[in-house]
Image: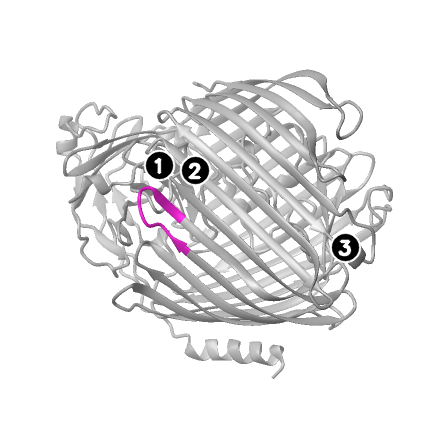
Amino acid sequence: MHLRSILAIACLTSILFAAQADAQSTPDPVRVARATGIIHVDGELDEAAWQDATRIDTWYETNPGDNLEPKVKNVGWMTYDEKFFYVALEFFDPDVRAIRAPFADRDNISGGTDYGGVILSTSGDGKTAIEFLANPRGIQYDAITSDTSGEDPAPDFFWESAGRIYEDRWTLEIRIPFSSLRYPESADQNWTAILYRNYPRDRRYQHFSARLPRDVTCFVCSYAPLTGIENLPSSGGLVAAPYATARHDSLPEDGLGSPLESQGSDFDGGLDAKWTPDADTAIDATINPDFSQIESDVAVITTNERFAVFLPEKRPFFLEGKDLFSLPLEAVYTRTIFDPRWGLRGTGRVGDATYTALVVDDEGGGPVIMPGPNNSGLAQADFGSLNLVARGRYDVGRSFGSFLVTDREIDGGGHNRVLGPDFQWRPNQQDTVTVQLLWSDSETPDRPDLAAEWNGQDLSGHGAKAAWSRGTRTYDFEVVYLDVADEFRADLGFIPQVGIREGYFNGGWTFYPKGFFSRVRAYAFADYTGTRDGELVYQEIRPGVSMDGRWNSFMNFSFSSNEVEAGKGPIERNRLFYTLQANPGRVFNRLELTGWVGEEIDFANSRPGDGARIAFNATIRPTDHLELVANTEYRYLDVENGKRLFDAEVERLKATYTFNSRSYLRLIGQHVRTDRDPELYTFPVEEHTGTIDFSALFAYKLNWQTVLFVGYGDQSALTEAEEFEPAARSAFLKISYAFQM
């Protein structure tokens, strides 16, 4: 049966089986009492104010159990004063020697370690919240969680935490300045909150202070309402963080293999500032920002890949209100802004409306995605631009509607403008319907020397996406339709594929056995993608099964049967995909093996082949201060009766010694290599390419904006003689201090 018919039957079956869900009961409100005295954040819950604070004794095990009474006791307290919101937690443990509490950098807390905290929704939208979590050492993890876009740990906030381990329990104190929160300037606050404990032992046990029904697809909607919070400050003040950097580089004086020659030293400086004129508005400004990456992105193998690889945003200026940039179509991807001279951004809320808008003057110099139906390319933009991104959202209960505008005005002529609405409808807590419509208008720069498409031509087109998902305790599914015109462009987004129509279905059935496995989900995925002229681009059917088990383990196996347009007609391939993951203990904290084996396509030369991908990742902690993270990946492809077209590999080892919650020393070594057989290619290729990178960094942090970094980097590149020769060397210094007023 043709895949398009299968998709149609799957959609019809989903509609027939979808029933209206009963409304979920709202958790009982929690009245938060104002603090009756001074609280010192030291991990000791001995202040008299905690005796009068709101106490929470009722908790639920939501994983692996289904809202059961936890096997260990948890107690929480909440209170506040004129400047701060406070949370105290007391987590009992029958064996404190089993507590997994490593020293680590901020946000480096995994599900295989002990931690806890509070998740606060203060904006009143009932969809987004901020996670304030910490481990027994006081190491912090903060993130934005959204029922619309999921969890994002990139944003950082100012707050304090301290933990302490006792003979039979561990405690945690948290103090959050109201200036770090966004809430309406109103006498009646519509806050919700939930307390959390992560307790990894033979399994990953998750405990919450409110029920999380498994037949509900939203998370923030399950929090308990908070009452009694009143007379909050109306202004958060100003934070200014000037920085200074110094860098010294050395490069080969006469090509690879020649001695390194000093390029001199560069000194730079700039300023990041945040002003909160009222509690629900933030204005960010930056002048000559330092967007250098303190840690390099983990290398990935891109050989034989058809489309550009997505890399996450890490730069502070772009992270305020980042959840508003999460869209069905990824029309906003701030890493397309390469080297800003200055930037200005406003984010806020007025009643049920939320907005964010940024303007950035970019010097350019980075790659731009050149999209297509079957593959994408990259063109180097050695020109500047003025960039605007704005989105407004209006909430109606659990649903919302919004409008997006992006505009890139190119120095010397040319532009790319994208605009359009989107909405999300949640008729109940099981179903979600999402629709987005976009229109783009482009005038490409007149630079055919950089890209053939950039000849000053006019391009215009639409992008549209519609999705319906449903989740219950036992079954779930998602149906999606995508339509993107050939001339649609989103230069400020990440849309590497255009000129297509796509439909796909993903559905599964979940059950919860007793024994080694606590959750098993059998699923099936079907996809059909064609050009707008009706020619096949891609189609796939993939059944599979995923399982949660003892030792905090996860397994996933699937069999993919697909057909892909490879340039000279469709080619079939069948592959077995696998994932094996476990977090067994304190020392071997995370082990993961992923990959596939079977038939593969040589996209560069449009022919079938056989190959495999193997990736292994591990986190090992010999002590609570030392963390070793290993990432390895190997891929090969054989064509023409077993002839090896290429071997590609990546090995990366990161060793971090964390002295305390403020300072660490990190060493990274990374090796990337690809070996090809030029005789098997229809165009010239290098037989051997590769690099070896080494970096060392010492960091001292009072908070996420008051920092000192001292670093060293060294890179070697592979020559035609298959020898690694010095390619670059650098020393780096950065100092930044955040003034809070």
- Quarter that holds the N terminus: bottom right
Residue 419 image point, x, y percent: 66, 50
For the residue pair 662 and 362, the one nearer the viewer reads as 662
Residue carrying label 2: 628
Give the residue at x 39% y 65%. 430
Q: CA distance from mark 2 to mark 3?
A: 49 Å
Is 585 contained in the magenta span?
Answer: yes
Give the residue at x 72% y 40%. 722
Upstream in the sequence, badge 2 or badge 1? Answer: 1
Which callout, 2 or 3, points to the residue nearer the camera?
A: 2
- Quarter that holds the C terminus: top left
**Of helix, strand and loop, which one carries label 3?**
strand
Q: Residues within 10 Å of mark 3 (few under 14, many from 20)?
A: some
Is 396 contained in the magenta span?
Answer: no
Residue carrying label 3: 460
For the residue pair 289 and 293, the one nearer the viewer reads as 293
Q: With respect to residue 154, does 458 lie above or below?
A: below
Where on the picture, by quarter, is residue 636?
bottom right
Q: Residues within 10 Å of mark 2 (few under 14, many from 20)?
A: some
Residue 515 image point, x, y percent: 26, 66
Q: Are marks 2 and 1 in contact (CB under 8 Å)?
A: yes
Q: Which residues are magenta?
A: 581-590
State whether residue 181 appears in this view: no
The amino acid type of the residue labelled 1 equals Pro
Q: Which mark is residue 142?
A: none
Q: Which mark is residue 622?
A: 1
Upstream in the sequence, badge 1 or badge 3? Answer: 3
The amino acid type of the residue labelled 3 equals Ser
Residue 312 image point, x, y percent: 55, 43
Residue 263 image point, x, y percent: 72, 18
**Of helix, strand and loop, which one carries label 2?**
strand
Q: How is the image coloured?
A: one colour
